[in-house]
Amino acid sequence: MIAARWVSLGLLSWLCCQPVSASSGKYLIGQDDRSGAYEVMFDEEKTTLDLSKDCYPGKVCPPVVVMIGRQVGTIEVSNCHEGVMYTFINKGDLDAGVVVQHEGGLYGSRGIPQFGMGSCFCYREGNLMCG
């Protein structure tokens, strides 16, 4: 009985001192066809994001979209793919935040500060829910 307790305490102390590793998805970041976190270039005049064609030519945007450049104001997002949880990252040059929403804002919006991120879910019929 005492030996079993020592073994249990020894195992418990060993488990407590082991490094913890995070397991999550890891994406290639960039603008090539294998990028899981696609960088979309914005300027002051680009205020829309079409998830079916604004990323790599001929492919839909992946679930992580990194907005780079000089984006400001509201970004109207269209053509999301049902069942996808999108993460939008604002890595813009300007210190102002942006707002991401389905075209017209009918299903909510998500404010994203510079260097921040926000998630939106694409529900049935291409409704991007960002509320």
Image (cartoon, grey):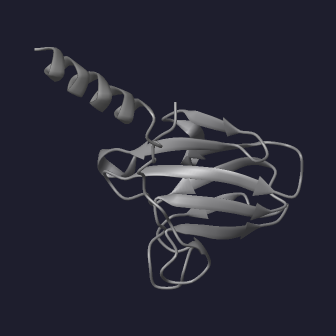
User: What residue is rendered at 64% in x and 60% in y?
Assistant: 66
Residue 69, quarter of picture: bottom right
- What quarter of the picture does the N terminus occupy? top left
The image position of residue 96, as x and y in percent, is 86, 43
The image position of residue 82, as x and y in percent, is 32, 53
The image position of residue 83, as x and y in percent, is 31, 50
User: What residue is rendered at 65% in x and 69% in y?
Assistant: 39
Residue nearer the viewer, 76 or 62: 62
| Figure check: 23 above or below 31 | above
User: What residue is rendered at 70% in x and 43% in y?
Assistant: 116
User: What residue is rendered at 53% in x and 32% in y?
Assistant: 108
The image position of residue 97, as x and y in percent, is 79, 42
Residue 40, quarter of picture: bottom right
Question: Going by the picture, which residue comes out furthest to the left?
Answer: 1
Question: Going by the picture, which residue comes out furthest to the right?
Answer: 94
Question: Going by the picture, which residue comes out furthest to the front?
Answer: 3
